[in-house]
Amino acid sequence: MQRTHAELRRFITNNFLYGRDCGFRDDESFLEMGIIDSTGLLELINFLEKRYRIRVEDADLIPENLDSIDQLCRFVERKVENHCPTMASSILETQAI
Amino acid sequence: MQVEEFLERSADVYPDKVALVCGSRRLTYGEIEIAANQLARALIARGVERWDRVVIYASNSVETVFAIFAVLKARGIFVLVNPTTKQDKLAYILNNCGAAALITTGSLIRTAAASAAAAPYLRAAIVANPIGHLDISEIPGKEVVSLGAAVEGQSAERVRQKNIDIDLAALIYTSGSTGQAKGVMLTHYNIVSAATSITTYLENAPDDVILNVLPLSFDYGLYQLLMAFKIGGTLVLEQSFTYRRTILNTLAHEHVTGFPMVPTIASILLQMDLASYSFPDLRYITNTAAALPVTHIRKLREAFPNVKIFSMYGLTECKRVSYLPPDQLDIRPESVGRGMPNEEVYVVDELGNRVGPDIVGELVIRGANVMKGYWGLPEETAKVLRPGPFPDEKVLYSGDLFRTDDEGYLYFIGRKDDMIKTRGEKVSPREVENVLYSHPKVGEAAVIGIPDEVLGNAICAFVSPKPGEVVSEMELRGFCAEHLEDFMVPQMVQLRPTLPKSANGKIAKRELRIEVEVPEEVA
């Protein structure tokens, strides 16, 4: 859980804030902060699918799933559990490449 | 006719009709009219006079809509600025147009306050949705007030004094080839003419519901608001296209009939499985900013079988240039069509003579929609507004190379300069290079656009550090993000020990372009 949090935060910071963590809260909305737009969202989905071996469906593309670190974290864990319950912990605990 | 009458006439005819849907808010024409009248009076009370420029620095919101019409009602000139604009550029715009007042929102107050402090002409700032009891009184020498406090006690009556239609209504800042943004001057007559032509060919009617996901600071987004109000329709205003599924749900729930997009939106939309959706109310889709790839057109037609698709082309300097009637889309999918009603467009050679079919030349536009020039830049203006057929008439030289077919339909060939079109917006490489050169470790920088399936063009910067300096791609992209609007930040920064030069010592962008466009295994 904590590892996923940290990993997602690092991805957001590196890709959308150019490595400068402005100290945003884990429950702060990306949309309201203005840091992710439609093309940014595609990059994020691409990362989630590769890193966590999940498939992000059209139906998943709503702010409730993706608009903050906390929401992302819950979404990833739910997806991984549903997709591959036996592997879930190993997927989430593996170091990101 | 004046632009604020788009709202006023609809408020007279349909006072109780929903004019604007934005998030959870649904506002009628009557409500918007009252809010705009009160804000207009609040601006006048703060010293805004006829022809004063008022900068609106805000994202898409109901308050931004109030502000646009309020400035016009106060006989001012509105200047909408993209909310991702950073401090230096906002200060530049405030000073360039000599803004008398600034309307902004709580979430943008830090940047707004810092810029406003450096704008001597600015007298007042009005802040919508302030966050708590914020530091709005902190701008030295300026009167700062919340929107709520500003309109309190103001009459809801319309302001009596009116402009005439040759008065300026708006300045729209656009990226200039010199690297400095230029304010496109548009009169009421320009805007009314363009909006009339466009709503004519789109056959807009009061039962139209238009969905706008584009920023109001982008003229294509702004016109969705203006046209919806002109026809007495309804505008569904969204912040962005980021959550595409939510947008598609809105499209269905709100019974949207018109959906304007740019190729980036089309490209993202077509990555979705659209078969599970149904949009029985959708009547038309428009595309502009850059031509849609033919494959996109085909897929859009499959996904939206009963929807008219309008391929269009335009410039901020005249709003819209051309549109392709939907019945021509299968016949000539690569064309962006012909001139709008009440507008003439033609292709000329280097000497300004009209050329026939299949000869590439510069596109020229004649019409009441053509701007008055660039604010405070007579020389830049003279380069693009040149004598037309009648005494004192000026026609617009677009800087875009086109050819026509035998029937006069237009085909875009390329730009005369090296301006980059990305996400539908125009970006001057110079503007990005200027920012890179201001970084203490950068020795040389060159910026080019490279084709990208989603963005149209991606912005690619080549940088060589000063001798002995080390700098990273991320550091430079971060630096750009601190100084440029989001759409101007390079997607790629490539670091090189030196940049290639042409015989006269200038950076050879052509070589850089070949380098990135040819895949490595082939090169």
Image: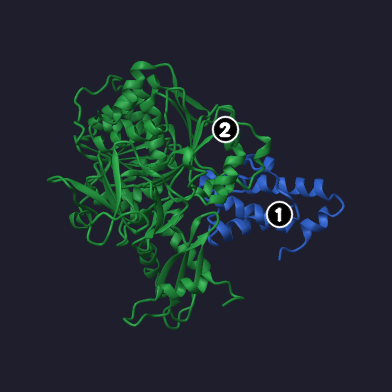
Chain colours: A blue, B green
A48 above or below B370? below
Q: How far apart are the two marked residues, 2 and 1, measured between alpha carbons?
A: 34 Å
Whether label 2 touches label 1, CB < 8 Å: no
Dot 2, crowdedness within 10 Å: few (<14), some or many (≥20)? some
Residue closest to the far front:
B406
- Work out whether residue B145 can be spotted: no
Q: Nearer the viewer, mark 2 or mark 1?
A: 2
Residue closest to the far left:
B391
Q: Position of residue A82 (x, y in %)?
A: 81, 45
Q: Position of residue B45 (x, y in %)?
A: 23, 30
Residue at point 38%, 26% (across, down): B231
Q: Nearer the viewer, residue B14 or B517?
A: B517
- For the N terminus of chain B, give its image quadrant: top left
- For the C terminus of chain B, give its image quadrant: bottom right
Q: Position of residue B402 (x, y in %)?
A: 36, 55
Residue closest to the far right:
A86
Residue at point 42%, 67% (across, down): B447
On the same chain, marks 2 and 1? The answer is: no
Disc number placed over residue B500 in the picture, else none:
none
- Work out whether residue A59 can be spotted: yes
Q: Secondary structure at mark 1?
A: helix
Residue at mark 2: B306
Q: Is residue B492 left or right of residue B164?
A: right
Q: Secondary structure at mark 2?
A: loop
Under mark 1, the amino acid is Glu
Dividing the picture into quadrants, the one containing residue B372 is top left
Residue at mark 1: A49
Under mark 2, the amino acid is Asn
B249 above or below B182? above
Q: Position of residue B98 (x, y in %)?
A: 22, 47
